[in-house]
Amino acid sequence: MENAAVRVRNLRKLYGSNSAVDDVSFDIEQGETFALLGPNGAGKSTTVEILEGYRNRTSGDVSVVGVDPSDGNLAWRARLGIVLQSTGQAASFTVREQLRQFAGYYPRPRNVEEVIAAVGLEEKATTQISKLSGGQQRRVDVALGIIGRPELLFLDEPTTGFDPQARREFWDLIRQLKREGTTILLTTHYLDEAAQLADRVAVINHGKLQAIGPLDTFGGEKARMPVVHWREGDQRREHRTSEPWAFVSALADRSGGEPPELEIRRPTLEDIYLGMVAHDVKEEIQQ
Ligand SMILES: Nc1ncnc2c1ncn2[C@@H]1O[C@H](COP(=O)(O)OP(=O)(O)OP(=O)(O)O)[C@@H](O)[C@H]1O
């Protein structure tokens, strides 16, 4: 990729003799939403913290919006938005005060009131952050991450604690940022969230990049094959096929009409991911 927002080559991080990140390479294109998935302890946070300039690497090359994070200065940092897994808020400030203060750190901040509205906190703008619920505090984290109009937004488990409606509103907000050209690196354990938002997905497991690819082909043809489910007498039956309609039509002919409890299920990203991680499936790594 010519103008990658993020470029990672042969990244390694050792903690003593433990290889937390082991020869990982990938690019994130400008404007792309990239989801980094993997089980607990896989090396996601270590990778992301190296990109954010919060952690040193053992070896490899890294460039984030054109700068090596280990040389990143304040001007570089102002081009990034970071929503960490947990943040220590200045809890005695109100939502509006906190956002106004943060807006002052950036050269081209977004409008504070617009950001408050975007994260759905209009009614809480004058409430002290310490008096907000966990999910509302998480919305403040997200608001602080976007107030500086970042080119590249890091979202680490952004919707933990959100109720279902708040998650959907958050997804709309992320789509809006994407339309404005923001590059997004999303780390999440919610596979439906990755499926909703990501253009490309990568799975990191035991420190290694296990799979990477566009959302709509991720996992390969075999893992994505639909499964036809139906009932025959008191038995539940299923059949995996790349041509479910042909199979269903033959099944209907055979059983003289639509079989009971007929369903065609396409594997979700979660199904594909779980199959991959459980079986340590090696995907062809393609950039
Ligand atoms: N500061 C540290 N010192 C020593 N080992 C560490 C340190 N931070 C992380 N590790 C180890 O590095 C490995 C990768 O951890 P990391 O936090 O990057 O995983 P993760 O994929 O982000 O996990 P999670 O989904 O649980 O957040 C783990 O084995 C972890 O124990």
Image (cartoon, rainbow, N blue to C red):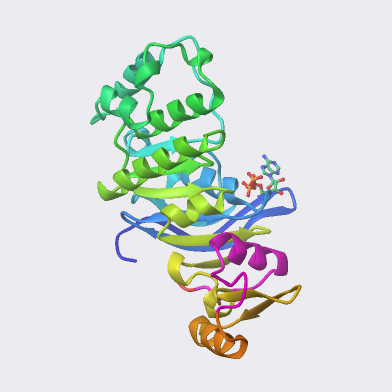
Q: Is residue 11 visible?
A: yes
| Image mark count | 0
Name the foreground residue: 3 vs 166: 166
In the image, is 271 to the left or to the right of 93?
A: right
Residue 72 screen position, x and y as percent? 40, 40
29 is higher (above) or lower (below) than 218:
above
18 is higher (above) or lower (below) than 260:
above
Residue drawn at (47%, 48%), measured in percent from left and top? Answer: 186
In the image, is 167 to the left or to the right of 125?
A: right
Name the foreground residue: 259 vs 171: 259
Residue 178 screen position, x and y as percent? 31, 49
Q: Quadrant of the C terminus?
A: bottom left
Q: Is residue 67 visible?
A: no
Q: Quadrant of the N terminus?
A: bottom left
Residue 216 in which image quadrant: bottom left
Residue 284 screen position, x and y as percent? 55, 76
Residue 270 in which image quadrant: bottom right
Range drawn in magenta: 258-285
Question: Which quadrant of the frame does ligand 1 lie within?
Answer: top right
32 is higher (above) or lower (below) than 231:
above
12 is higher (above) or lower (below) than 154:
below
